[in-house]
Image (cartoon, rainbow, N blue to C red):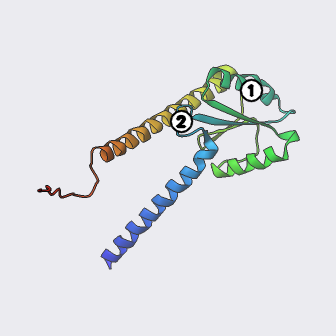
Amino acid sequence: DKMRFFVSLNALVLMLGIFASSVCAADDDIWYSELGTENAKVNLYFFHSKTCPHCRVAKPFIQTLPEKYSWINLIEYELTSSREGIKLFAELAKKVGGNAGAVPAFLYCGKIETGYSNEQTTGRALEKNLQDCHAKLKQRANQELRSDSQIDGAQSSGKNQPNRIEVPVLG
């Protein structure tokens, strides 16, 4: 009985791992763009409102980020005039376990941050978190490139190919 339990438990863990990796891969399209290229970008979703004073303070700083960092893809929605933006905000917030009840909101790399004080505090913290996310993205891309080159190298060197018997032709 214990053996059957452990076999079942291992099978469950394996299935959850496969499911989680496929979910993460699907989410990559939300949080990143141009994956698999040297120009991979972090998608920064910025949700704000015309009537929100903190949003008005955040907006100029947020809009400078893609100019400062070419790897940031800013996706901006002004919610008082965008049903699409409201729907997307709710969907993304739910996906990361957050709440779409406050603006300004910043969603990136599978996380949500809301509120904004000023460039020196909230702005710099957001900027650092984006830099950290980008560094992880680059690290992941480098690992994938190394993995691909190892596979290519193994194939070109004859590794992972069936054993061959060479018979000399006598004539």
Question: Horizontal and vertical percent for residue 31?
Answer: 61, 42
Q: Residue furthest front?
A: 171
Q: Residue at x 38, y 38 (%)?
A: 146
Q: Is residue 100 left or right of residue 13?
A: right
Taking depth in this image into account, of 147 and 92 the one nearest to the observer is 147
Classify residue 108 by image quadrant: top right
Query: Could you tell me which secondary element the residue under label 2 belongs to?
Result: loop
Q: Residue at x 59, y 34 (%)?
A: 41
Crowd around label 2: few <14 · some 14–19 · many ≥20 (10 Å)? few
Mark nearer the N terminus (2 vs 1): 2
Q: Which of the image's four quarters has the C terminus?
A: bottom left
Query: Could you tell me which secondary element the residue under label 1 belongs to?
Result: helix
Badge 1 amino acid: Ala
Q: Residue at x 58, y 52 (%)?
A: 26
Return the residue at label 2. Answer: 37
Q: Are marks 2 and 1 in contact (CB under 8 Å)?
A: no
Return the residue at label 1. Answer: 58
Q: CA distance from mark 2 to mark 1?
A: 30 Å
Q: Is residue 58 left or right of residue 152?
A: right
